[in-house]
Image (cartoon, helix red, strand yellow):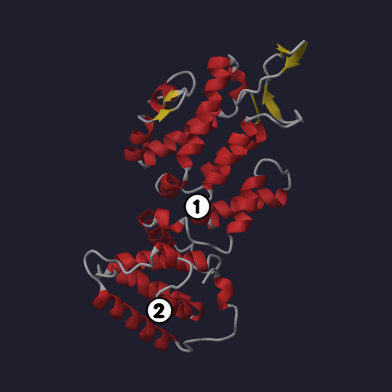
């Protein structure tokens, strides 16, 4: 069971909504009978994609033709504080990742339950697949590098309609920023900053000029600015909760590293003048949304650069505490 492609046939397991409700009640009754205080009846790591338990397969099959009904029953079970309520968060998250274009993300109640489900099963969700994964990864790779209006519109739509799926792929943004900061592109178009002057080196009897690349000396401003705009468009209550487990802190630290290089090593604050106000706004949103995790992060250390708090409060981050 890898994606909704498995459900593309015309076969309908349950014709009527009445029968769908009855079948789902059987699933819930089974879970309540099998449930123990220390067991959630969730698939093991090896079963998260294949060899799913029968009760979960049945739930997916029913949901194919009666999705709204099944989602309502799942949320009702959670509301009732049933013994299988924790398991239902997992099921709801699996349903969304399987049917991302049809499950009602725009319904505020469904969205709130999904956000809670993502928080509860953050690390587990990263191992699951979604039919939109490849499209979203490609979109993130192209963020800030393509001027096409269609791509920009798709990125905006994803941040609104599929933010939970997008945040699963935050590591793509971290890799993109770190790669760009190496400054290995041959073109200087769109790049801000400088390269250190060539140094002389002796190799045998020859004296040659060498350029030493230092991470962050130059960067593509369009890419770094687009990433900030994109992250700002994502729901803060999801980005700074679920996103903590998916890598958002690494992305925030990438900017602090870039700012440090330009302020402390190059003395060129003007090179980051367009980025820093956006960054400060995003970090303040983090602090307001999740103060506990913000405090934990601010006291952490970035190797070779210092503590996050020191960087934020210095002229590197210009963050007003």
Q: Earlier in the sequence, mark 1 or mark 2?
A: 2
Question: Would you place residue 32 above or below residue 251 in this image?
Answer: below
Q: Position of residue 30 (x, y in %)?
A: 30, 80
At a point 48% along the width and 30% down the height, the residue shown is: 280
Residue 146 sits in quarter: top right
- In the current view of this chain or complex, which residue is farthest to the front? 204
Q: Is residue 40 left or right of residue 257?
A: left
Q: Is residue 232 visible?
A: yes
For image coordinates 34% across by 34% down, the residue present is 295
Residue located beneath label 2 in the image: 54
Horizontal placement of 196 versus 160: left or right? right
Residue 201 to residue 301: above or below:
above
Residue 257's disc number: none
Direction from residue 138 to residue 21 in the image, left or right: left
Q: Secondary structure at mark 2?
A: helix
Q: How many marks?
A: 2
**Residue 225 in view (yes/no):** no
> Rounded to the nearest whole Å, what is the CA distance between mark 1 and mark 2?
27 Å
Q: Nearer the viewer, residue 313 or 90?
A: 90
- Which residue: 41% across, 57% down? 124
Q: Which residue is mark 1?
A: 168
Q: Image height check: is 167 above or below 83? A: above
Q: Is residue 119 left or right of residue 164?
A: left
Q: Residue at x 28, y 70 (%)?
A: 84
Using the image as rendered, state which of residue 313 and residue 257 is in the foreground.
Answer: 257
């Amino acid at each position: 069971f890898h994606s909704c492609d498995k459900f593309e046939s015309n076969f309908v397991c349950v014709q009527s909504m009445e029968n769908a409700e009855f079948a789902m009640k059987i699933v819930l009754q089974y879970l309540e009978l099998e449930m123990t205080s220390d067991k959630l009846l969730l698939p093991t790591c090896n079963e998260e994609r294949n060899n799913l338990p029968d009760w979960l397969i049945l739930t997916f099959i029913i949901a194919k033709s009666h999705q709204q009904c099944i989602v309502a029953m799942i949320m009702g079970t959670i509301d009732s504080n049933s013994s299988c309520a924790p398991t239902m968060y997992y099921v709801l998250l699996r349903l969304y990742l399987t049917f991302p274009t049809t499950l009602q993300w725009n319904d505020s109640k469904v969205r709130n339950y999904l956000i809670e489900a993502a928080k509860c099963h953050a690390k587990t969700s990263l191992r699951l697949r979604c039919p939109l994964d490849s499209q979203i990864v490609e979109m993130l790779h192209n963020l800030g590098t393509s001027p096409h209006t269609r791509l920009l519109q798709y990125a905006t739509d994803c941040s609104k309609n599929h933010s939970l799926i997008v945040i699963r792929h935050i590591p793509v943004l971290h890799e993109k920023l770190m790669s760009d900061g190496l400054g290995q592109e041959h073109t200087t178009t769109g790049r801000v900053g400088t390269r250190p002057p060539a140094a002389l080196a002796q190799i045998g009897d020859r004296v040659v000029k060498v350029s030493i690349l230092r991470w962050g000396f130059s960067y593509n401003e369009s890419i770094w600015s687009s990433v900030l705009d994109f992250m700002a468009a994502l729901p803060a209550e999801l980005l700074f909760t679920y996103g903590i487990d998916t890598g958002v802190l690494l992305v925030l630290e990438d900017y602090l590293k870039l700012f440090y290089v330009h302020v402390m090593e190059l003395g060129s604050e003007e090179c980051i003048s367009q980025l820093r106000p956006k960054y400060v706004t995003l970090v303040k949103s983090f602090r307001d949304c999740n103060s506990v995790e913000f405090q934990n992060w601010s006291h952490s250390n970035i190797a070779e650069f210092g503590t996050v708090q020191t960087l934020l409060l210095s002229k590197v981050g210009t963050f007003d505490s």
